[in-house]
Structures are given as C-alpha cells and as structure tokens.
Image (spheres, rainbow, N blue to C red):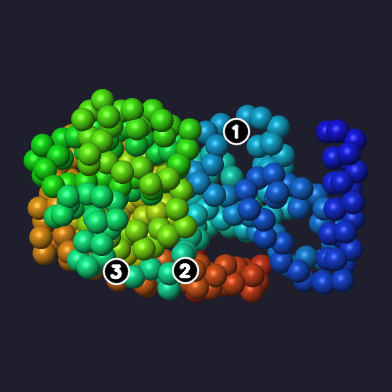
Amino acid sequence: MPAASVAAWTCARCGARALIRQSPGAVIHTHNAMAHYYAVLATLGLPVKCRINTRHGMGGRTRSGRQEWLYRQSLRFTDYAVAVCEAARQRFAADGMRPRRALLAVPNGIRLERFRPADDVARQALVAELGLPPGSRIIGTVGRLQPVKDHALLLRAFAKVRMQVPEAALAIVGDGPLRAALEAQAEQAGLSDAVRFLGDRHDVPRLLTGMEVFALSSASEGYSVALLEACASSLPIVATDVGGNREIVRHGINGRLVPSGDTAAIATALIALLRGGEQAAAMGRAGYAWAQAEASFRTMAERYHGLYDASPELPSATMALQGRTS
C-alpha cells in the first residue's frame, strides 16, 4: 500500500476509534468485503454492541485472493453476515461463511412512494414520446449494458416476438460498454424501428408506467432492484431463473421464469404475456400487492433494526423476518 494511503488509513482508523469510544454500544454495519475487514480492524477491542456486514450480489465465485482471505478472517469478529436474498445466503453458507451468531438474508427494499401502477394513458404517452407507431406495446428492461445482463439474448428473443406480435416494441433503459454492439445487433436484425436505447435515465419510475411487460434476461443476479421496481409498477415480468429472481418473480403468479440463455423460452413467455389479456394484468396486480407488503425500504429497515436491537441470542421474531441461519 502506498505511503500516502497508509497515512490516510491510519488517520481514518484513529478517528473512527475515537468516535466509537465516545459511543459505547455502537452498531458497526458495513457493506461488502473490503469495507468490512477495515472496519473490524479499526474497532477491535472497542465496546461495540455488534458488527454486521451485508454482502451484495451473489458474492465471488472463488475463495482465493487476499481480499477474500481478509474478509473470511474478519468474520471471526462479526456477529451477523447478511445476504440480500435467500439464494445468496445459501451460496455463502455452502462456501463456508461463518459469522459468530448467524448468516441471514435481508432482502433489499425500494422507495415504493416513487412508483405507481402502469396504465393505458401512460402507455400511449410513452409510445408517442419514443416515436413509435400508435398502438405499439412496449416491453421494457432496465439495467447496465454489460455482459452479465445479456441484452443480446433479449434482442434475439425480441426478434422472435416481433414475428408473432408485430406491434411489440422494446425499450432498453441503461448504458454501458456494450451499447454500440447492441445497437449494431438490433440494426443487423432489422429491429431498429422497434427498439429504443434510452441510456441512463433519472425518470425510470415514469418510464415504467408506460410499459406493458418487463423483461430481465440476466445470466446472473443477486436480488434485482429492477424487478422490485417492475413489481411496484404493476408490470407482469419475464425473468431468467437465476440468483434471487425466483424470490421476486413467482412463476405463474406475477410473471414467468425462464432458463438462463434460452432465447426461445424468453420469446415464448413474452408472447404469452402480451397475449395474456386479463391474466397478464392480474399478474401485474399480484406483483404490485407483493411489493407493497414485502419490498419497501421501510420493511428492509425494520428488519435491520431488529438486528441492531438483538441480544446475543437472536430473537425468534427477528429470525422469522430475516431467514434461516447457518
């Protein structure tokens, strides 16, 4: 580590220790690996109530490497390690993550008040805004344009959808290193008239109200905020069955789950929802109701607050909220 970095770390560590000495019984809550082992090192020997670490996503695929080794060592001084979905919690448990008290799952939450259900008026307005023909029916997706999101797969599936539902359109919200390649793919497939690349946007809640179906074609996911937002917007969903997606999309209830990498399956599911009429609308309403009950920022905060208040013996009520321990 460069000398300037060492000096900065030493200064920050001393400041943190001084602050915590003035607040006995503090809760130390970090996010992801590097921040956690630095925080553990900075607080050793101090009167903290508990140390909590949240690992986002599905974690690394290997236990090798200095950073992961340091993180594993820090778990010996960590009360609770938290995954953002049950699928990730199970992976961490199988990979030997062992905090002192419990390995739990606390699903992410969103600010539900920012979202409202999609409706026909908003759909017509978005069709006009995007310069699509009247009567177009927008399939939407939100996510960074990078390999793991597999937008190329979605474009291939959309080409099949268009053959069956010619009024279908695709709105891709997000930006990233693959944008030029994806735009070229759409053009080569003859889809440019029906696909819109919207880039990074600050009005995603408004855009969602103009969509008819939400699609997520990722090869890997943790607990997708994009899916939570689609539920909060009352959209039926087609998503790949990876990571924590099945904890949000319940097949046949608020959408359809399809195998990762299966172009035909995604196309078939999208066509079914576009043709689904009242059944598809009922899926959207089911997702909305689930989001109101389970996906709010407040619900997530209350679950973490239960950990902050927990005694060394984790209360059974908190256990029920957080998920199983390992």
The residue labelled by disc 3 is 117
Q: Earlier in the sequence, mark 1 or mark 3?
A: 1
Amino acid at pointer 1: Arg
Check the image and name the residue furthest to the top: 188
Q: Earlier in the sequence, mark 1 or mark 2?
A: 1
The residue labelled by disc 1 is 63
Q: Do the residues under discs 1 and 3 have CB atoms within 8 angstroms?
A: no
Residue 85 picture quarter: bottom left
* 251 over 241 or under it: above or below: below
The alpha-carbon separation of the residues under discs 2 and 3 comes to: 14 Å
Amino acid at pointer 2: Arg
Instruction: Please tell me which residue is depicted at 26% across the width and 65% down the height of the picture.
Output: 122
Residue 159 spot, x, y in % from top left: 19, 34
The alpha-carbon separation of the residues under discs 1 and 2 comes to: 34 Å
Q: Is residue 223 visible?
A: no
The alpha-carbon separation of the residues under discs 1 and 3 comes to: 43 Å
Instruction: Please tell me which residue is depicted at 87% across the width and 46% down the height of the picture.
Output: 8
Instruction: Please tell me which residue is depicted at 16% across the width and 35% down the height of the picture.
Output: 160
